[in-house]
Image (cartoon, coloured by chain):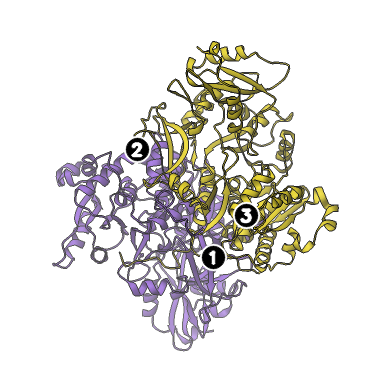
Chain colours: A yellow, B purple
Amino acid sequence: MDLLKPSPANSSPLTPLGFLERAATVYGDCTSIIYNKTAYTWKQTNRRCLQLASSLKSMGIQRGDVISVLSPNLPAMYELHFAVPMSGAILNTINTRLDAHALSVILRHSESKLVFVDFLSRSLILEAFSLLPSEIKSPSLIFITDDDVNSTLTADCFDLDFSYEGLINKGDPDFKWVRPNSELDPMVLNYTSGTTSSPKGVVHSQRGLFITTVDSLMDWSVPKQPVFLWTLAMFHSNGWSFPWGMAAVGGTNICLRKFDAASVYGLIRQHSVTHMCGAPVVLNMLANNPSKEPLSNRVQILTAGAPPPATVLYRIESLGFIVSHGYGLTETTGCVVSCAWKHEWDKFPATERARLKARQGVRTIGMTDIDVLDHESGFSVKRDGSSTGEIVLRGASILLGYFKDPEGTAKSLKKDGWFYTGDVGVMHPDGYIEIKDRSKDVIISGGENISSVEVESVLYSHPAINEAAVVARPDKFWGETPCAFVSLKSKLNKPSENEIIEFCRAKLPHYMVPKTIIFEESLPKTTTGKIQKFKLKSKAKNLGLTRAESRL
Amino acid sequence: MDLLKPSPANSSPLTPLGFLERAATVYGDCTSIIYNKTAYTWKQTNRRCLQLASSLKSMGIQRGDVISVLSPNLPAMYELHFAVPMSGAILNTINTRLDAHALSVILRHSESKLVFVDFLSRSLILEAFSLLPSEIKSPSLIFITDDDVNSTLTADCFDLDFSYEGLINKGDPDFKWVRPNSELDPMVLNYTSGTTSSPKGVVHSQRGLFITTVDSLMDWSVPKQPVFLWTLAMFHSNGWSFPWGMAAVGGTNICLRKFDAASVYGLIRQHSVTHMCGAPVVLNMLANNPSKEPLSNRVQILTAGAPPPATVLYRIESLGFIVSHGYGLTETTGCVVSCAWKHEWDKFPATERARLKARQGVRTIGMTDIDVLDHESGFSVKRDGSSTGEIVLRGASILLGYFKDPEGTAKSLKKDGWFYTGDVGVMHPDGYIEIKDRSKDVIISGGENISSVEVESVLYSHPAINEAAVVARPDKFWGETPCAFVSLKSKLNKPSENEIIEFCRAKLPHYMVPKTIIFEESLPKTTTGKIQKFKLKSKAKNLGLTRAESRL
């Protein structure tokens, strides 16, 4: 048996890029992308991507060069998920809500050779370029135009040769795309979102993205030819791998620049949307602003990125959405843990169902292993649903490493064979995990660990509260106490600080009850709907020590 | 980027074995296997496999040892697909229709250490052992008992310690199963079926089987928790990878010892079967013996192994089955090419739909590439649906190699990066391939290549013909002429040789029309329903040269 070695026929590198070529054969005349009045077929999308990749090669882009993209969910953003790696380059999609300084840090760190930019962000990117140190050559710039917002600007403002459509037009439709030399070749570089202060460059391989894509489709049971509404930003962890996934199943991508509840309900009706993704904040938005007409068809909605409050799950499902709940990180691209639903749970009351669905769940079939390790001993925690530890993962979807950060890489990808997520969770007796908090978000009060998520989920069940986030406030006696930031559904119905504290006391042990309640118009969030707790922590710190009389 | 190397957390070997552990968590109390009055849950199946694997280790089985199984689709056969590789051994399932001589050849070639045998095959295996050369130590023997056929025999005839259930009972349910050192470790050894005279030992790796399993589930759009009826022999290419696939989706496996049309229809009704597989001969059997009651639910049926005659496809679909058609070989375990259906074809008439569905199709998303290469030049054939060449494949599902056959391995897995299938096909203008014949089954008459499959599909459309196979008969003038073997649907309606020849003349070019028609009670077949053409070829040869007057 030892004589049997891999050969090129059985060991060709795994890559999700080949899905596009296949989609052009199988779904050639079916619609690949719709954006306002623009629509493409899979044959057209394949041809456009090949042409663009060939133009990038002609411009001198080399295998392994980094190409950045700053764009909302326009058709170009979808195409670049194929065209950039098909040219041999590494795709770096950037959060569109960053400021010029953060942008310049990323452009410098990534050594980006070329940046594709939504025309509406032209002044932002030029400002970012101006912040680059003088010894650094600015990357080349290609503007993505959008007929719907700037058709008249297009011709006037810049050289058509260096416009997005110009590059496509002059490309070769018979271009042979650049296949990876090895399946471990890097394919994307994603900077972690603004929930932490120092962004890290997460690198994923072709193999990792192939496995994540296939695994995510399987886990969500995505059928052939779904209609997928892009309510999740593609720049965020590559839209959880669904740009490649939609090519695998020949789906129709409904693109959009930005959205609110009304436009989402409108697009669902207009295009008979079957699938969409979004952080819990998107679910919350849809639940709080229901459409007047009921949904014409049931819509599958996959949520991840933060633990969804059970109340929100309950309300959105009653509107006709079917929620699946998964868990992943920028370091895994897509969901690698999901709350696999059991038929036997169907018979439980709605609130109990929502509580079960709010758990993160079990590893997907593409992952090798998952565990929760005690912070002190490093052993698996008890399967009791209450002993907390760090969630660790192992499998092909895990990042290759952090770019130019060997220390950070070694700290996360440890020699014991686990990737350490930094998330605090518990293992339930049935083998399902549940996140209790990010390690850095745990509040330590009088030596007791308090899960901010647990306190938040009580706050979310208060009828007047729209959003809630709980962080640590320094305290001379206890070290830290929980401080809650809340926004309200309506100005007309404002409970007092004491009323909310009393509400929490009825449902939480005393030490977990917030000692401070701060009312805000709205809470600071990343584009993907994660509440930026680091901003709230600094605000809480500035409040000074908790007053003695608020202690229990 | 070059500094980013794989680490244990992101490069754990891909294997389908972990699906079982996960099924025990997610689908623990759901039914995994049903066989007559026996039923197990996924928790039980996981425990039984762990116990069995631990007993195998205790018996001295080493990593890389070969363990053979000779069994119909009993629950044990399903469990052994996990338990054997979980012990570190390589699984070798053997065709149950082989004779003692063929069995002894395989046992000797595979150097099998242990054989699990269905109790009803005990005399056959003992005869095979007696044929082994005296210097070879016979493998150990474990009998699989079947309460439904031999409960009274069990206790009397052999030591319970060495019965299948005995091994399970004394095993350790907390056994840590043996994970592969590398994902390229061999996991199964499958000897090619009896359609060729010299069996070859096809070796598949853990990685290959992981990819094939996931790919096959995706391609067939298998939902969570299907009810799968085992009408496909598990010994045949590991049941196209569905033993592992059913654990991935938490399906219910309906096992059976043997079947006819009535029992299949009965089981479909009894268990609300949703999915089943079978060679075209199974479809033919179901179409020719329809149940009196219509199907209570639509049943997905995946067919492969031989090109299905369009007439059979048409008839089986009219009974309420939904047919998917794929293509694979022992060298790929499962289907790696499939006739991906296009919505636009729905509007075609039924016969045209059946003709389209009879094509093998396009590569699955798990495969890297497929092509049809001209026999002479080695270049891709024209996409015209008529230029024939050899079908070649590339991807993770391709075998690691042939066991102890470096020449055979090098001949199939060529240095140009392709696996050569030996099947002759064409590429249609739309990028779908269609098999015309096995290389060795092509009839060469007066320098013209005749596809035996094409002639057969005309014969199948004759209302009186049940089965048909066309092979070469030697001819002094033409070299070879087509000779047809046919079986009839009913003795009462027997067309003459001339009537059949006239029927073919109306539909085929003259040189393709069979010059000889031989009526048979039934055609010789392998267990998996492939007609054994080598037997018919030898029969045709023995007929002597075609008579001059039958020439055109």
Q: Which mark is residue B40?
A: 2
- Mark 1 to mark 2 CA distance (whole Å): 46 Å
Residue at mark 1: chain: B
3D distance between C-alphas at marks 3 and 1:
52 Å
**Residue toward you, A67 or A384:** A67
Which disc number belongs to residue B462? Answer: 1
Three-letter amino acid code at the position of disc 2: Tyr
The subunit letter for the residue under badge 2 reads B
Query: Is A298 left or right of A256, judged from the image as shown?
Result: left
> Are the residues under badges 3 and 2 in a single subunit?
no
Towards the viewer: A280 or B512? A280
Q: Which secondary structure, mark 2? A: strand
In this rendering, position of residue A71 left or right of residue B226: right
In terms of depth relative to the viewer, which is nearer, A181 or A463? A181
Label 3: few (<14), some (14–19) or many (≥20) C-alpha neighbours in 10 Å: many
Q: Percent position (x, y) of residue B182?
A: 36, 56
Marks 1 and 2 share the same chain: yes
The amino acid at mark 1 is His
